[in-house]
Image (cartoon, coloured by chain):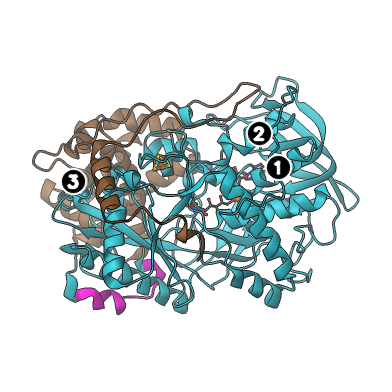
Chain colours: A cyan, B brown
Amino acid sequence: MSTASPTAAKQHTGTAHGHHATFTSFAQAGLETEVDFVVVGSGAGGAAAAVVLARAGYRVAIVEAGPWRAPEDYPWTTYGTIRDLFPDWGSLVTQSRALWPIVQASCVGGSTVINSAIVVRTPGDVFTRWEREYGIDGRALEKRVWEHQDRIERELSATVVPPDARGLLNTLAMDAAEKLGWSSHYMVRYAKDCEGAGQCLQGCRKGRKQSTNVNYIPEVLERGGYVLSTAPVKDLLFDGRRVIGVTGRFQDPETRKFGARFTVRARKAVFVAASATQSPILLAKSGIKSRALGTLFRAHPGTGVFGVYDDPVDQNIGATQGWASTAFRQDPGLKLETLAIPPEMVAGRLPGGGAELIRRFREYRHVAMWVAAVRAESVGTVKPSLFGGPVVKYQLDEADMRKLRKGLSMVTRMHFEAGAREVIPGIFGLPYKIGPDEIHLIDEGPTDPRCYVAILSHLFGGCPMSADPRQGVVDERGKVHGYEGLYVADASAIPTTIGVNPQHTIMALASVWAENLVS
Amino acid sequence: MNELVRFALTAYYPRVDDLPGLAELGVDEKIQRLRRESTLLFWTGIVAASVAFQIAPLLTIRKPLLASWLSAEDLDQHAHKMATHPGYLVRQVTFLIKLVGGMFWGQSAEIRAFLDLTPYPEDPGTRRVEAFVPRQGPLPGGAPDKLLSLGKKERDRGRDKDRGKGLQA
Ligand SMILES: Cc1cc2nc3c(=O)[nH]c(=O)nc-3n(C[C@H](O)[C@H](O)[C@H](O)COP(=O)(O)OP(=O)(O)OC[C@H]3O[C@@H](n4cnc5c(N)ncnc54)[C@H](O)[C@@H]3O)c2cc1C
Ligand code: SF4
């Protein structure tokens, strides 16, 4: 990892702390303030943009819909995770033939709090494609994105999962890949001294995982900025075609009741980084006119199979995700990974019900879950519903479904190489368990998305970037076409899938766009 | 309403041999809490799924009865067949029941003990309300012995040399 540093953190020595404001009731006075830049959303994109602006000496306000939960506040259980970290109890699903859950977080730190912090640099071919299909100067962007990725890797301790944190879930996968001669690796993650507590998806209570709520957001406060938590932005404020601030009402995270109003004006600009499902909605509800708004929604849908081993694997002991292969990113368009899910999730995820489900669950200690995520080409839309929330219409086409199926057959093959006695494919229409000579059942399996229990966690588009205002909402600087003072700096601006985990790309892109305004 | 939900959840997670069923694991208190804490949409979804579970035996085991009138054996069959039903919407309905029931059952101290896991502490449910929240570093601690011995094997196999191959796709 290089040490180049375009916008490095100089040690902040000032004592003028900023201010964290959170829910106040309706009866209390609201909050009104003015800053240089407002950033809506504190996840990967919002935090990365905010810290670049704050380091340049600007006064920044981060306005975040969810509450601020520090590691000591994180839940232990899946119930607590859905209650405390997911927006609306995780009820967002794709509204198409298959109802696949869309997993995101709503809290200070956004989805970085519940993700596995896997770091992969933006592949060069992504920029080539953006140049070819969206009129972006790919080479110039590539150079700057990689420079920022150098810096972020250093600041957020991007390291390979240490041997002592791996656990059998991950080492077995490496054994299998080595036997098959497939190129693979132990993951690089933003984690400092990971001890393999296996709690990444509930938030790392050990404080090892470097989600943005433990580093960049507090740094913005240290540098005199504001953080508003439990503060969902309802509207952008305009002066003609110039965006001059944001407004909304604080919302109690427990009762969901609305409280006092907040209004934050921006002297220079507003960055919207509310995620691929929320940024297009905020822009649409605020009256932004763009025919591309809500289009080019994309994802890397993923699902997995369970290998069943004679000896206990104890997948929940060791890094939640520690092994991956990107060797199949181009052909057929897949990423293979390990993924530990807690017992209570497995209890709901195994096929069947009643006594048969309990008998199946008995094998929990012996199962390991390995997943395939598709670099899908299918596109969908995100539009506001009558009630104001997002409606996501998205479904994998036949070609993408074939990739998913292929990925599942590949991880099944790996399980058998690693010594699994059976595999639970979890595909409707297939037997509950298959043996090594039945992998062809997956290869020949259904391509109907309703037969698979997949999720969407890597999301893209909705406010896509393109030089052409008819094709994109933002230009290559992240600026919304046709408006002044309004930028989008999150996954929603990415016009294609990228075939690797997106956080590093989102953070670097947001940094580049924030840096443009600094100079 | 709570009774209806209880019936569906406990049908999916019954006692089997030494593994206690959800009915024995404080399900009533858990349902009350869910009702109190979840959103209207989520609660409505789980109630609707529980209603569907009641009226669906005709679809699954071809008996024109409510699920609560079934014998224990038929009820168990009904639960299993709903979860594996050819109709996608029927399976989706059970998905919600299994998600909630699975959380209640799988998180309980008794089931965790069976898996050789310590009980989960209470979810704090707290959040930061102070005006300044400092940066946070790693808390003290280390990997358990089981991981350390696997780590030693990894090093012995030369699997500690990679300094970041995964960074590049
Ligand atoms: C379970 C899971 C595992 C993942 N693992 C990885 C991984 O290992 N590596 C990787 O690279 N990627 C991973 N991802 C994906 C990655 O986390 C996301 O791509 C990334 O966080 C998206 O960044 P974002 O800024 O677009 O949105 P988010 O990080 O989701 O942040 C958006 C924030 O905006 C807030 N917001 C929304 N609406 C409003 C509003 N109206 N007003 C104010 N605030 C608002 C939300 O509450 C949220 O906090 C994972 C995702 C999930 C869900
Ligand atoms: S595996 Fe555990 S210690 Fe490591 S980052 Fe995830 S939660 Fe933290």
Q: Residues within 10 Å of mark 1 (few under 14, many from 20)?
A: many
Residue B136 coordinates in the image, percent (x, y): 54, 30
Q: Are marks 1 and 2 on the same chain?
A: yes
Between label 1 and label 2, give the one nearer the viewer: 2
Range of residues picked out in magenta: A438-450
Inspect the image, locate mark 3, and give the three-letter code of the amino acid beneath it: Trp
Q: Residue at x 64, y 59 (%)?
A: A146
User: N-terminal of the two: label 1 or label 2?
Assistant: 1
Q: Front-most of B157 and A167? A: B157
**Residue A47 relative to residue A476: left or right:** left
Please say if B32 is above or below A347. Answer: above
Chain letter of mark 2 equals A
Between label 3 and label 2, give the one nearer the viewer: 2
**Residue A468 relative to residue A342: left or right:** right
- Magenta segment's dominant SS is helix
* Residue corresponding to mark 3: B69
* Residue corresponding to mark 2: A219
Chain letter of mark 1 equals A
Chain letter of mark 3 equals B
Please say if A170 is above or below A198. Answer: below
Describe the element under mark 3 as helix, strand or loop: helix
Q: Quadrant of the N terminus of chain A?
A: bottom right
* Residue corresponding to mark 1: A50
Residue A146 marker: none
Quarter of the image for residue A295 reads: bottom right
Describe the element under mark 1 as helix, strand or loop: helix
Estimate the spatial distance between the alpha carbons at disc 1 and disc 3, rounded to whole Å: 60 Å
